[in-house]
Image (cartoon, helix red, strand yellow):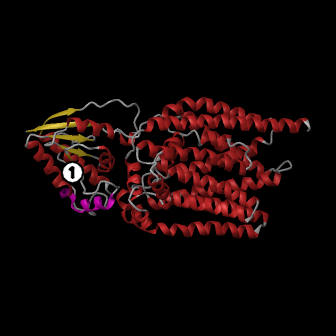
Amino acid sequence: MPPLEARVNWARHSAVGLGLLVTLGLIGLHLEYYRHAGPLWRDEVNSVNVATMPSFGEVFANSQFDSFPVAWVTVLHAWTAAGLGDTDAGLRRLGLLIGLAMIAVLWWTGRRLGLGAPLVALVLFGMSPTTIVYGDEVRGYGLGALGVCWYMGAAWAFVEKPTWKTFLVAELAALLAVQAYFANCFLVLAICAGAAATCRRRRAWRTLAAVIVLGALAAVSTLVNLPTITRAFRVGTIEQGDYRLGSLVEVFRYALAPGVPRLAMLWAAAAVLALIGCGLAWRFPAGLKAQADKDRALFVAVTVSVGLVGYCCYLQIIKLPTQYWYYLSLMALIALGCDVGICLLVRRFRAGEWMRSAAVALAALLVASSVAETVAVRMTNLDLIARKLEESARPEDLIVVFPWYCGITFQRYYRGPTAWITLPDFEEHRFHTHTLVAEKMKQGDAGIRAELERVERTLRQGGRVWIVGAPVAPPAGQPPPRLPPAPTGPQGWRAGPYLDGWELQLGALLQAHGADTWRVSLPDPGPVNTWENLPLLYVEGWR
């Protein structure tokens, strides 16, 4: 073997070895999250409540109450039906399994894309706290990212070798992607666009036609979720906010590496280097693999570009305030695109593979401790509050939980004798029942009249009102806002002004008539998910 070829092979083997070390570190990070995550928070409880209905027919009929297509509820239902999800720990093991499978799929896709070891993707995407925390939670986001990653590799494998076997694998991956997370439809379209552009450049018309069939079959399969999609459009207005590109970009930027600024800088640097690598491979192809590199550059450039545009279109359609976990699938796509682009760049240098390995090793060492600290988070404290109330609340007391959707978690963990309500209150606390919120909004101020009367009656009769949440009162001397029946309110059918106004009405009642207010100390469980870390206090006496 010539000395140069031997050095190249040694560099590649070393990259694989480094990738395995990074993978071991990632496994440790996933286990760290699993060890700290603890009880389920409201979104996870909502999914579990849907998936644990007695039969799959009932699960499917009620899947509209979750945020995912049929694949996620099917997997979760199968897991619980097999007796593997009878406890919180058992359910968290499913999330852990999906997270570890995601790492394996990164490797599988990386090798299909000619990376050898997907070093850049393992660090950028694999080490992001968003990936570990929200990819491993008992929700469909991790499965959705896994599906997109798998389809990206499978689609390229089909373009490279168009056989019935590679077609079937690609179709299975596409079906999983679109049936795990609704937004993935736009990313599957992006991958199909990248594959189609490559086929067109090669003039491989039969393969191009097959790529169109891949996407078409996946698109048709989404019709099975039509009831869920219809309901989402029917109730979506309640949760919609102002669609501003700047705010979406800001959330996405933070989602890349929440709590780990160094990793965020690595994402930016990787994107620039990948862009340079793809540009050079396209404009100045060199070496024995010049045409193959040009095809890969075209594939990832079109895929990522169309993916970004398509995702913006998806967000424009739903108009919901975005959260970190919404971007998980897009992050996987971009990370793999960056990995390919950087690979195309470094292979133009004699020591390029060594440079990539050294940079990745240094990056992993720089961010590992911060990532480990960030992912050691408990997902809720409502189980602790429920336990405290079981010990301290009396039968004549009243518990008020708000925001109303936190009642989903509270119902799962509270077993005490004291009556409890949410603000506003509903007969159903298992799901995110936005239609019931709309019914309350139609009543304006009267929407929580019964709840406020219960609070007043409890205090007048000598009971205590326990508040699970942070009550806000209007400024001194100002009355709470008056809310006309929807849709004549401040923002039409949007629920935000009504929920805020109702909380102010409760706060005004307690401020004006509650004799004493006491904050209750809770056990310190360490860092808790900011989306469900509520205080507990109680009010007693009437004045």
Q: In this orientation, does residue 259 appear?
A: no
Q: Which contiguous range is marked in magenta?
A: 433-446
Helix, strand or loop for the magenta stretch, by majority:
helix
Name above or below for residue 385 compared with residue 109.
Answer: above
Q: Residue at x 60, y 34 (%)?
A: 25
Nearer to me, 189 or 19: 19
What count of labels does the image hold?
Answer: 1
Q: Quadrant of the N terminus?
A: top right
Mark 1 lies on a secondary structure that is loop
Q: Quadrant of the C terminus?
A: top left
Name above or below for residue 78 compared with residue 357.
Answer: below
Image position, residue 492 (x, y; %): 31, 61
Nearer to me, 434 or 135: 135
The image quarter containing residue 241 is bottom left
Residue extending farthest right: 2
Image position, residue 328 (x, y; %): 53, 49
Asked if residue 240 lies left or right of residue 166, the reply is: left
Look at mark 1 in the image and give the residue it sits on. Answer: 481
Asked if residue 422 lies left or right of residue 120, the reply is: left
Q: Is residue 47 magenta?
A: no
The image quarter containing residue 377 is top left
Image position, residue 225 (x, y; %): 47, 66
Asked if residue 81 lies left or right of residue 272, the reply is: left
Asked if residue 23 lies left or right of residue 206, the reply is: left
- Is disc 1 surrounded by few (<14), some (14 to 19) or many (20+) residues within 10 Å? some
Q: Amino acid at mark 1?
A: Pro
Nearer to me, 448 or 87: 87
Image position, residue 165 (x, y; %): 71, 62
Q: Residue at x 21, y 59 (%)?
A: 444
